Image (spheres, grey):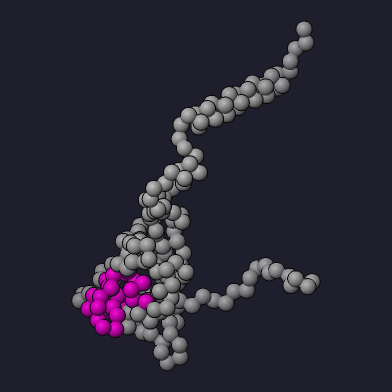
């Protein structure tokens, strides 16, 4: 009697196991849940993507937006958790500053380049002088850092409209399920929001070449 090599034997055993699993899956599918096509054909209500849960939990903090889009409520990425020295009132208070060059030490990395020509913004046009833990608009209304899009939209109203509609910005979760989008400051540096000019790494050759 010829002996079957060990490697060949292992291969056939594995192949048999795969066939048995596949057959059991087919049998359970035939007797169990409907197919996607069946669920579509038997649907009695319009599809609502908001009922679909996201496939994973986001590892970053989100907050409920104070705005709405055409689909209703949505969430944005929180901002305050990303500010290393928040709360600002720890330093910006009535206590005397006892160190030299405190502003240079804490804010020396800030390069303010927001606005064109003589319309360059200053710190106090966005930061509340009465409470540094908040932003402020031209009407003196305080705005939470987590909802900085409310301040950005005062000037960049066209971009805010596109952001609400989904044409501007980036979504953090899947296309279905709860809508979670990036805040303005998730992509743009609030002190210097313009992106540097960048040429594409690759390009398509003209069709006539």
- The mark total stands at 0
Q: Is residue 98 visible?
A: no
Q: Quadrant of the N terminus?
A: top right
Q: Image point 37% across, 66% down: which residue? A: 69
Give the left or right position of residue 181, taking residue 15 as reference. Answer: left
Give the left or right position of residue 206, taking residue 98 as reference. Answer: right
Please give the range of residues in magenta: 127-153
Residue 135 image-quadrant placement: bottom left
In magenta stretch: residue 152: yes
Farthest top residue in view: 1
Q: Image point 63% across, 70% down: which residue? A: 200
Q: Name the residue nearer the viewer: 94 or 15.
A: 15
Give the left or right position of residue 9, taking residue 109 as reference. Answer: right
Q: Can residue 125 be seen in this view?
A: yes
Q: Name the residue nearer the viewer: 95 or 50.
A: 50
Q: Name the residue nearer the viewer: 167 or 43.
A: 43
Q: Quadrant of the C terminus?
A: bottom right
């Amino acid at each position: 009697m010829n002996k079957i090599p060990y490697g060949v034997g292992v291969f056939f055993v594995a192949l048999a196991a795969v066939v048995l699993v596949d057959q059991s899956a087919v049998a359970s599918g035939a007797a169990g849940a409907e197919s996607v096509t069946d669920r579509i054909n038997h649907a009695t209500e319009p599809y609502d993507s908001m009922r679909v849960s996201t496939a994973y939990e986001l590892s970053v903090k989100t907050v409920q937006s104070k705005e709405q889009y055409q689909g209703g409520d949505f969430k944005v990425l929180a901002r305050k958790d990303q500010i290393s020295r928040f709360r600002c009132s720890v330093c910006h208070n009535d206590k005397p500053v006892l160190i030299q060059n405190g502003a240079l030490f804490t804010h020396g990395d800030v390069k303010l380049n927001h606005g064109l020509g003589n319309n360059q913004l200053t710190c106090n046009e966005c930061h509340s002088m009465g409470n540094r833990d908040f932003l402020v608009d031209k009407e003196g209304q305080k705005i939470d850092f987590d909802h900085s899009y409310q301040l950005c939209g005062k000037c960049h109203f066209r971009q805010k409209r596109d952001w609400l509609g989904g044409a501007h910005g980036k979504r953090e979760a899947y296309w279905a399920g709860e809508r979670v989008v990036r805040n303005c400051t998730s992509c743009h540096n609030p002190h210097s929001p313009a992106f540097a000019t960048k040429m594409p790494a690759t390009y398509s050759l003209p069709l006539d070449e």
